[in-house]
Image (tube, grey):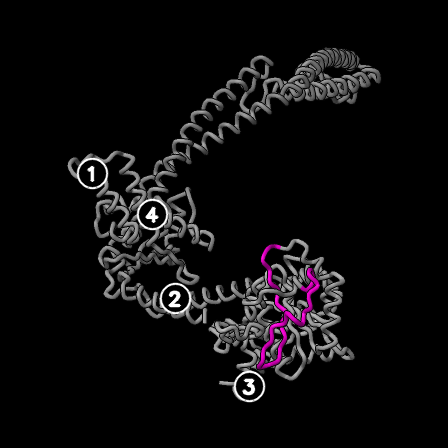
Amino acid sequence: MIVAAAVAAAIVLGLAYIFTAVPLYTSNVSVLIDQGNREVVQQLSTIGGVVDDEGSVLSQVELLKSDTIAMSVVDKLDLTNDAAFASAGGSVIGTMVGTLRSLANVSSWFVVEPETSDQVEAKRRAAANTLLWNMEISRVGRTYVLSISYTSPSSSLAAKIANAIGEAYLVDKLNSKYEATRRASGWLQDRIAELRQKALDSDLAVQKFRSSNGLVAAGSVLVADQQLSELNSALIVAQSDTAKAEARLQRIAQIIASGQGDAIVTDVLDSSISNELRQKYLDASKREAQISDRLGVNHIQAIRLRSEMTEYNRLMFEEVNRIAESYKSDLNVAKAREKSLTDSVAQATGISATASETQVQLRELEREADTYKNMYQTFLQRYQEAIQQQSFPVTEARIITRAAAPDSPSHPRKPLVLALFVIIGAAVGSGLGAFREFRDRFFRTGEQVRDVLNLEFLGIAPIVAPAKAVDAPDSSDGRGIGQVRKTHAVSNYVIDHPLSAFAETLRSAKIAADLALTGKSCKIIGVVSSLPGEGKSTIAVNFAELLAGQGNRTVLIDGDLRNPGATRAIGRHAESGLLEVLIDNRDPQSLFLRNDRTKLAFLPAVVRHRIPHSSELLSSARMRQVLADISNTADYIIIDLPPLGPVVDARAIAGRIDGFIFVTEWGKTARRVVRQVLASDPYVRDKCLGVVLNKVDQERMKLYRAYGSSEYYYSRYSQYYQEG
């Protein structure tokens, strides 16, 4: 019922919303992250990148949702002063509150104060928030297309704002590239100045180091290294010349030592004197041979010619000696030159070694200078590129579909709204039902009694509307003083409705008592409950009436000396009762009130003042004797006892009771309370014949019935066997 009521209420609210909701129009603009501009953008821009993955596309979605775009659209369209836009910015309640505040501001009726900068900024911020609230951005499938939609009560305004959002996005992309390039240019300019100074300082440091360490360079080679190379070359030549001169000297010395005046020596052949002397020698030898052949060898002319030949030979040998002396002089010169070059090479080698050690630091300084020089050139080139890029209005995004004013509203979607309200109603109803079920910690069914208390379930006693009894005897003429007088029909219900569920439950209690208390001639049964007001007195009176109506000798005793409910129900007119029997030792037979219809005997409890020792009276020897005396003349003694929770009277008389009928109110008394009460009185629990659920709402009980339960059988078949 709760779920059905919640769904019905939700349907009513949904219909009310559908008929009263303001129609809203949605306009869409599509923006493409164009991959066709990829190469152009990469060529013209080194700042930023091209959107080519899912994360970047989602980043563009968040950019469209940013305050920057919203503020740009608000300022471009002047939405803070647009009445149509302002009407869509808040709820009806917010509009009413704003109107009331403006009316309450009496000063604004006469003087219009100019808005402050804070107020203007607050209006811009509120307009931007309204725009973002009504805007929706989504990616179209796996493409690079972003769909931007805006919803407004005005179709033209929706289209205008949607187009403005797309244009603001493109302008923001251009501005972001320009700003990035501008910031990069500024940073590069500062960095270039710093690198220029560092390049100059590093070059100056190289030159100073060269000067201070004598590392004079000729081109790319140090002068010391160049000199060493030249000296090494000259030394090699000098050593070669020395060896050559020494070889010539040795050869000519061998010739001189052998006395070979006609030996072939290069310098002899090249000497004009030697050649002339040799020619003369040959001429003389020729003439001497001729004269000797004609005139004989002893001819004076032949002898003279041989003497000339000897002289010529001596002169040629002397010429060889002269050449040998020149060779010796050349050898000395070559050795002196070689020694000089050797000394120079040794000196240059020492200088070069020292320079090599110093060059380690020099190369480090040169590398640092080259690094700064290259960085300076690179940054200078990037700076020139950044300056040129500021004038390129190229982005990788473009609008492919512009927004148009829609013809039909997009909201509310009536079927969807109604279905949503139905779902919400069902959810709320289910939640309320679940909450009530969770909060329902009372006894509702017999299964709960068996599961929680582990006691027998005797049945239910339906709630009965109170009505005045019609068979109460009239005592105005002195008659009926010794008879019960029922003030309410509920005390006589089991007699008036013998086929009711109430009577069936009490018959079940009688069977339970007969089965549990077999062998006893008189069964003493106490009726108890956990708390006051659960109807145990009504159950006790009707149970006693049922037993008496079946022909059993039955005595009902009101044992509740603190709150005698049975006495108020059927013996309000009594003057004496159980207290007089226990205290004054009066005969209980003389104080019985009887019901002539069922032959029930009732011993009331007339309490005129509070009795603090009621538990001692119930557990006294006199009470034992009274019960023993009544047992001799009765088959059943039903005692209406006080509740177990607040007082200990029932616990005190538990030893005199053969069995207990436990009464608990249906849907009122918590299960935890009943469980704790019985756990604290194990003697009562052990003698408990079963539990009766009292004051059961039969209409609500149908909601708790389950197939196979006692409630199911009662509700399913009671119409065939009970009174109408």
Q: Is residue 671 visible?
A: yes
In this rendering, the answer to whether 715 lies above or below 603 is below
Kindly report the distance in space between the C-alpha atoms of the residues bearing marks 1 and 4: 29 Å
Check disc 4 and report the residue beneath it. Answer: 129
Residue visible at 29% across and 38% down in the picture: 121
Residue visible at 44% across and 61% down in the picture: 142
Q: Secondary structure at mark 3?
A: helix
Q: Using the image as rendered, state which of residue 143 and residue 417 is in the foreground.
A: 417
Was residue 687 drawn as part of the magenta stretch in this picture?
Answer: no
**Precedes in sequence: disc 1 or disc 4:** 1
Q: Secondary structure at mark 4?
A: helix
Left or right of residue 407: residue 575: right
Q: Secondary structure at mark 2?
A: helix
Q: Where in the figure is residue 669, as x and y percent of width and height?
A: 58, 63
Stretch of the chain drawn in magenta: 581-610
Which of the 4 quarters of the picture holds residue 31?
bottom left
Q: Identify the amino acid type marked 4.
A: Asn
Which label lies toward us, 3 or 4?
3
Check disc 1 and report the residue beneath it. Answer: 106
Left or right of residue 593: residue 519: right
Q: Name the image quarter holding the N terminus.
A: bottom left
Kindly report the distance in space between the C-alpha atoms of the residues bearing marks 2 and 1: 42 Å
Q: Identify the amino acid type marked 2.
A: Phe
Question: Does the residue at mark 2 contact the one at mark 1 (Cβ under 8 Å)?
Answer: no
Which of the 4 quarters of the picture holds residue 139?
bottom left
Kindly report the distance in space between the C-alpha atoms of the residues bearing marks 4 and 2: 27 Å
**Precedes in sequence: disc 4 or disc 2:** 4
What label does residue 421 carry, if any?
2
**Precedes in sequence: disc 3 or disc 4:** 4
Q: Using the image as rendered, state which of residue 555 and residue 141 is in the foreground.
A: 555
